[in-house]
């Protein structure tokens, strides 16, 4: 049995780049910095992230440079030819889940993407579309309401 699963938390290095394929599918690309500390030294890895369709549009609208995010997805390596005709390869994470961990900026105050597109995987989103419903986020009035 093989498992291809990646989970990580990092900060965006720049605003996501949102594009559309010729068939109209949205795709967003961005990178996150994942920093670890070991024996008093810091090491930062830059992880390339690719997001498709509805979640890509949410990333393009709500994410911005410096914001902290949680990403789940699968690792993929692909090859391409650069401008000079050299064969290159890139490893990236194809994300199927994204959670925003930073508070919204002043430009996005009061705006938050729907939970059905932000916090569930592809199976749950597909199920919601078929059932015509969505998950509701819990509302906590004070710290005593938080279940942990």
Image: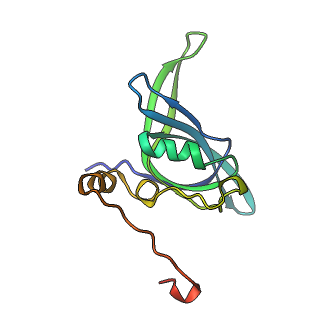
Q: Residue furthest right?
A: 40
Of residues 91 and 23, which is closer to you in this image? Answer: 23
Relative image position of residue 105 (x, y in whole percent) = 70, 56
Of residues 16 and 132, which is closer to you in this image? Answer: 132
Q: Quadrant of residue 10?
A: bottom right
Q: Quadrant of residue 17?
A: top right
Residue at 43% of width from left, 48% of height from top? 73
Say above or below: 54 vs 87: below
Of residues 95 and 46, which is closer to you in this image? Answer: 95
Residue at 58% of width from left, 85% of height from top? 142
Relative horizontal placement of residue 29, taking residue 67 as reference (left or right)? left
Instruction: Identify the colour scheme used.
Output: rainbow
Relative horizontal placement of residue 108, taking residue 90 as reference (left or right)? right
Relative image position of residue 27 (x, y in whole percent) = 48, 35
Say above or below: 11 vs 24: below
Residue at 47% of width from left, 57% of height from top? 114
């Amino acid at each position: 049995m093989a498992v291809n699963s990646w989970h990580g938390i990092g900060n965006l290095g720049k605003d996501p780049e949102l594009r559309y394929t010729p068939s109209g599918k949205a795709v967003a690309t961005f990178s996150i910095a994942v920093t670890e500390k070991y024996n008093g030294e810091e090491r930062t890895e830059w992880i390339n992230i690719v997001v498709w369709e509805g979640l890509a549009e949410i990333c393009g609208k709500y994410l911005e440079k410096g914001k902290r995010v949680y990403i789940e997805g699968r690792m993929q390596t692909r090859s391409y030819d650069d401008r000079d005709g050299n064969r290159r390869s890139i490893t990236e994470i194809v994300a199927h889940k994204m959670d925003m961990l930073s508070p919204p900026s002043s430009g996005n105050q009061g705006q938050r993407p729907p939970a059905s597109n932000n916090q569930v995987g592809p199976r749950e989103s597909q199920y919601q579309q078929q059932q015509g419903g969505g998950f509701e986020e819990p509302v906590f009035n004070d710290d005593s309401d938080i279940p942990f």
